[in-house]
Image (cartoon, helix red, strand yellow):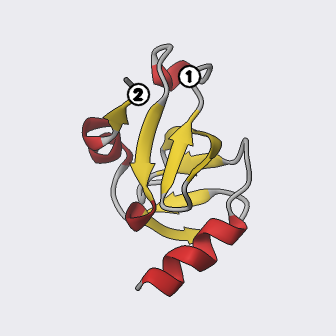
Amino acid sequence: MAEMHNDHARLIQNHMEVVGSDGQHVGIVDHLEGGDVIKLTKSDPAAGGKHHFIPMQWVDHVDQQVHLGMKSAQAVKEWQDAA
């Protein structure tokens, strides 16, 4: 499983859109933190002016966007706020 996350990490680039399994917007990639956490930009309107973190385990696949394996509302509910 860790190998798959590493493959996803190599494909993820700064400023890519992150979407839920329902195709709805979750956020914009600021950068990867340590290869296993995605930090989302705070400038995105969905972020409410705060950085948020989502684990790589949530990523289902990556193409032009980062697709999560959960619906967007669940991801927003469970993401971690930056301190």
Picture quadrant of residue 12: bottom right
Residue at which label 2 appears: 82
Above or below residue 20? Residue 51 is: above
Residue at horizontal 53 percent and vertical 61 percent from the top:
67
Residue 81 position, x and y percent, is: 35, 29
Q: Is residue 31 above or below residue 68?
A: above
Task: Return the mark for residue 42.
Answer: 1
Determine whether the residue tagged by mark 2 lies in a helix, strand or loop: loop
Kindly indicate the quadrant of the structure image that contains residue 22. Answer: bottom left
Q: Residue at x 44, y 33 (%)?
A: 52
Front: mark 2 or 1: 2
Q: Amino acid at mark 1?
A: Lys
Location of the C terminus by quadrant is top left
Image height check: is 66 above or below 43? below
- Crowding at label 2, few (<14), some or many (≥20) Cα neighbours within 10 Å? few
Tell me: residue 37, above or below residue 7: above
